Every structure is written in C-alpha cells, then in structure tokens.
Image (cartoon, grey):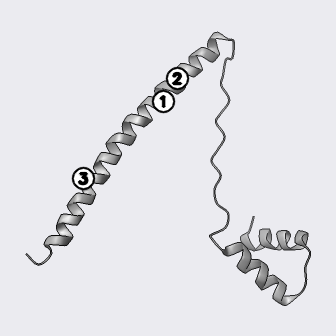
C-alpha cells in the first residue's frame, strides 16, 4: 500500500493518545476524590464553604511579542518604562 508508514504512524499515535486520555481520566478522578476529602475535613473544622481555587494565569502576550512591541515604540520616540507599559496595555486592549 502507498501510505503504509503514514497509516501505521497514525495508528501508533492514536493508541498513545487513547492511553493518555485513560491515564489522565483516572488521575482526574483521584484528584476529585482528594478534593472532596479535604472539603470534608474542612467542614469538620467548621469551614462551611471552601474558597474557590485561584484561576490559572492566562498568557497575555505571545512569545517574543513584548520585545517587538517595545522596540517598535522606541523607534518612534524615547519612552519611560511606565509609558511603555501603558502603551502595551492600550495596544492589547486591556
């Protein structure tokens, strides 16, 4: 067959991904059980409602974007660090 190597590679990768899903599913289940146990222990000590977990940080800039932005702004005119930060925030629309 013309695509034997491609097909066998895709099948191998599919098995690897399926095993990863299974492994992570078990780990996720264990983490949920652990969280429930800790919540139960907190209730024993009088904490009625556990605080919400902090959110993961979301990347604001792509890799290398900050230096490019700084150099582009400095080519126009000299700026202080404070002005560069304000300009970057304005450009990203934050």
Above-or-below relation of 5 to 25: below
Label 3 or label 1, whichever comes before in sequence order: 3
Where does the N terminus fall, quadrant-wise?
bottom left
Q: How far apart are labels 3 and 2 at the CA level? A: 32 Å
Residue at point 91% right, 84% down? 78
- Up/down of 9 relative to 22, above or below: below
Q: CA distance from mark 3 to mark 1?
A: 26 Å
47 horizontally vs 75: left or right: left
Where is residue 89, by image quadrant?
Answer: bottom right
> Which residue, given by chain and number where applicable, does mark 2 sit on?
36
Q: Which mark is residue 15?
A: 3
Instruction: Residue lying at the far bottom in this picture: please name it.
Output: 76
Q: Label 2: how many residues lie within 10 Å, few (<14), some (14-19) or many (20+)?
A: few
**Residue 59, horizontal then vertical, whole percent:** 64, 60
Instruction: Report the residue marked by disc 1.
Output: 32
The quarter of the rendered structure image containing the C terminus is bottom right
- Given contact means CB atoms under 8 Å apart, are the residues at marks 2 and 1 in contact? yes
> Looking at the picture, does residue 53 appear above or below residue 81?
above
Q: Between residues 92 and 21, which one lies in front from this camera angle?
A: 21
Residue 57 placed where, x, y %? 65, 52
Does residue 70 appear to the left or right of 44 in the view shown?
A: right
């Amino acid at each position: 067959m013309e695509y034997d190597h491609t097909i066998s590679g895709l099948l191998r990768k599919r098995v690897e991904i399926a095993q990863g899903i299974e492994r992570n599913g078990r780990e996720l289940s264990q983490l949920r059980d652990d969280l429930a146990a800790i919540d139960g222990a907190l209730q024993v000590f009088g904490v009625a409602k556990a605080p919400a977990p902090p959110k993961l940080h979301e990347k604001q800039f792509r890799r290398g974007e900050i230096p490019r932005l700084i150099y582009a702004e400095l080519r126009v005119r000299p700026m202080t660090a404070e002005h560069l930060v304000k300009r970057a925030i304005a450009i990203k629309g934050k």
